[in-house]
Amino acid sequence: MAGKNLDPSSSPRALLGAELRVARERAGLSQAELGEPLFVSGSFIGQLEAGTRRMHLEFARQIDDILSTGGFFVRNCGAAAKSKYPDHFAAAAEAEALATAIREYAPLIIPGLLQTEAYARAVFRAYQPTASEDTIDELVTNRLARAALLTDPTTPLLWIVLDEAVLRRVVGNAAVMAEALGHLTILIRAHRIVVQVLPFHAGAHASTGDSIKLMSFEDAPPLAYIEGSGTGLLFDDPATVTRHSLTYDLLTADALPRRESLALIESVAEDYAHDQHA
C-alpha cells in the first residue's frame, strides 16, 4: 500500500475508504478500536470506509501512524477531499449521492435537488448579488448536477416536507415559481418523490426554522445534516440523529396528507401561472 496512490478520477473517496477498511482489518482492529485513539466513534470510521464522510488531513496523519501505512492516507486524502461544493455543504452533498433514503424539511426554499435552473439562479443571485455571471453559472450547474441521482426510478427514496412559506415566497418572479412548482408536481405524479406541505394553520411546530436532512445508507450509519444561512453541520452521533429524526416525524404528523399537499401545490402553481399571463 505504501507505494500506491489513488486515481483522483475514479471515486477517490470510495477508494480511500476501501483502502482504510483493508488496512484496519489487516491490523486486526475493529472500527471502534481504530476510532478510540482518534477520539471518534466506530460509526464515524464506518462512514469513512463507506465513503460517506471525508477524511481530513489530521485524521489521515494519525491513521497512517496507527496502521503503519507509510503516509498513504496523507498522500491521498487531498484527492478525496476535493469538492465543487462550499465547505459547509460538501460532506453532506457527497453523502447525499450515496444515500438510499433522504428525508428533508425545507422551511424557506425548494430543496436544491428539486430546483429548476431558473429557480436556482434566482436563489444564488439573491445570496450573491455582486457575483459574476460565470460564478452564478457554475453554482447553478453544480446544483442541477446533484439532481442526477433522481434518474434512478426508485433510489434514493426522497421524502420532503415543505413549509407553506416555500410555496408562497416568490423566488425570481411568477413565471419562475410556476415552473418550479410545476416541476415538483411532475415528480410527485410520477411517484418519484413524496412531498407533504406543512400549512401555516399548523401553527407552532417541532422545527426551529433550520432545514433538516436525514440520510440513510445501505452499509453505513445514518447521518443528519442541519443547515442555516451559509452554515451546516453534519451529525453521526446516534442520539443526535435520533433526536432530529423525531423532529422530522413530528413535522410529517403536522403536515397535510400527500393528496392534499399535491392539490395545494398545484393550486398555488396555477395562481402563479395566471399572474404570469396577466
Image (cartoon, grey):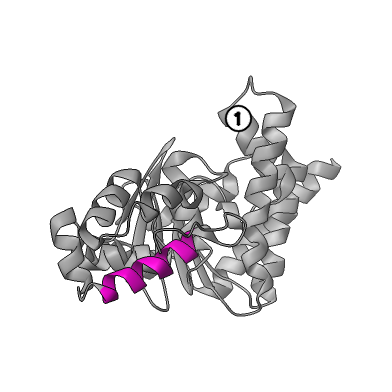
Q: Which residues are magenta?
A: 13-26
Image quarter hosting the C terminus: top right
Residue in the image at 23% along x and 54% along y:
65
Residue in the image at 23% along x and 71% along y:
31
Three-letter amino acid code at disc 1? Ala
Residue 204 horizontal side relative to residue 238, left or right: right
Residue 44 horizontal side relative to residue 220, left or right: left
**Residue 248 rendering spot, x and y as whole percentages:** 35, 64
Residue in the image at 42% along x and 73% along y:
217
Residue situated in front as seen by the camera: 180 or 137: 137
**Of helix, strand and loop, which mostly describes the magenta segment?**
helix
Whether residue 222 is visible to the viewer of this picture, yes or no, is: no
**Residue 39 rendering spot, x and y as whole percentages:** 15, 54
Residue situated in front as seen by the camera: 7 or 58: 7
Whether residue 140 is visible to the viewer of this picture, yes or no, is: yes
Q: Is 57 colored magenta in this rendering?
A: no
- For disc 1, the marked residue is 126
Residue situated in front as seen by the camera: 216 or 90: 90
